[in-house]
Amino acid sequence: MTLPHPNTDQISLPIVLGVLGDPTRLAIVRYLASKQGVPLNCSQFLDFGSKTNLSYHLAKLREAGVTRAEVVGTNRMITLRRADLDARFPGLLDGVIAAAGDDPALPAVGGHDIEVHARP
Amino acid sequence: MTLPHPNTDQISLPIVLGVLGDPTRLAIVRYLASKQGVPLNCSQFLDFGSKTNLSYHLAKLREAGVTRAEVVGTNRMITLRRADLDARFPGLLDGVIAAAGDDPALPAVGGHDIEVHARP
């Protein structure tokens, strides 16, 4: 099973910005960026919201072309489409991630700073 | 008469991104950026939409802290809050403007390229 993703040239700037205009989705993107390309499964975002909310937010990010979701068994492994976004809008994602980097208004993992990578 | 604007430290990243997630508002920001700080009045954005729509979009940009609107007589003079946004989120606005710079999907002035500054 493969989920639909826009091609790189179909990624739209207003849609990407609109999708990033949400604290939970920004927190997801910030967390993915902190993992530097390591895929995360949905359950690793549970600090950011309920399963239902996360499904919604992850679908919005995927449909906008911000993330890629690979179905692996019963899991979905999520990565940031950093290379595609950098190709389409050079510097944009870095600017967003830098701006989100120290924003205390965004949800964080385990109530800790997002830089804390260790998980139980 | 003074219109309400958020202070620099009240400008919120998700709100700014959400407000920029709209083709008309991105076109307004791109046009303001191309004017390099010269204030524009509302009528100079009429290529981007009707007066009613523009009032709505300009209010959203002002309330998010993206633009400043000064009431001068019966006019409102609009500028981009570039210094405030750069102080709050370094590099973000540059990334957005660069990404919007050559996006043919955004409304343009007089149907010309946004680089054309002369107006009748």
Image: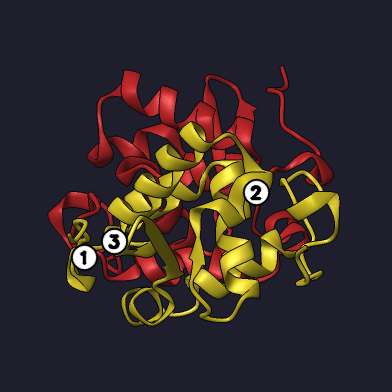
Chain colours: A red, B yellow
Residue lying furthest front: B73
Left or right of B5? Residue A13 is: right
Q: Percent x, y for residue A21? A: 41, 45
List the residue tagged with mark 3: A118
Q: Crowding at label 3, few (<14), some or many (≥20) Cα neighbours within 10 Å?
A: few
Chain-order first, disc 3 or disc 2: 2
- Residue at 21 percent across and 65 percent down: it is A113
Q: Specify the subunit that label 3 lies on.
A: A
Q: Is residue A73 above or below residue A37?
A: above
Determine if marks 1 and 2 fall on one subunit.
Answer: yes
Q: Percent x, y for residue B84? A: 33, 77
Q: Is residue B66 above or below residue B79?
A: above
Which numbered mark, 1 or 2, is in the foreground of this view? 2
Q: CA distance from mark 3 to mark 2?
A: 33 Å
The amino acid marked with disc number 2 is: Leu
- Residue at 72 percent across and 45 percent down: it is B107
Q: Specify the subunit that label 1 lies on.
A: A
Q: Is residue A22 above or below residue B52?
A: below
List the residue tagged with mark 2: A13
Q: Quadrant of residue A9?
A: top right
Q: Secondary structure at mark 2?
A: helix
Foreground residue among B8 and A41:
B8
List the residue tagged with mark 1: A113
The amino acid marked with disc number 3 is: Ala
Q: Secondary structure at mark 1?
A: loop
* Quadrant assignment for the N terminus of chain A: top right
Which numbered mark, 3 or 2, is in the foreground of this view? 2
Q: Specify the subunit that label 2 lies on.
A: A
Residue A28 visible within the image: no
Chain-order first, disc 1 or disc 3: 1
Chain-order first, disc 1 or disc 2: 2
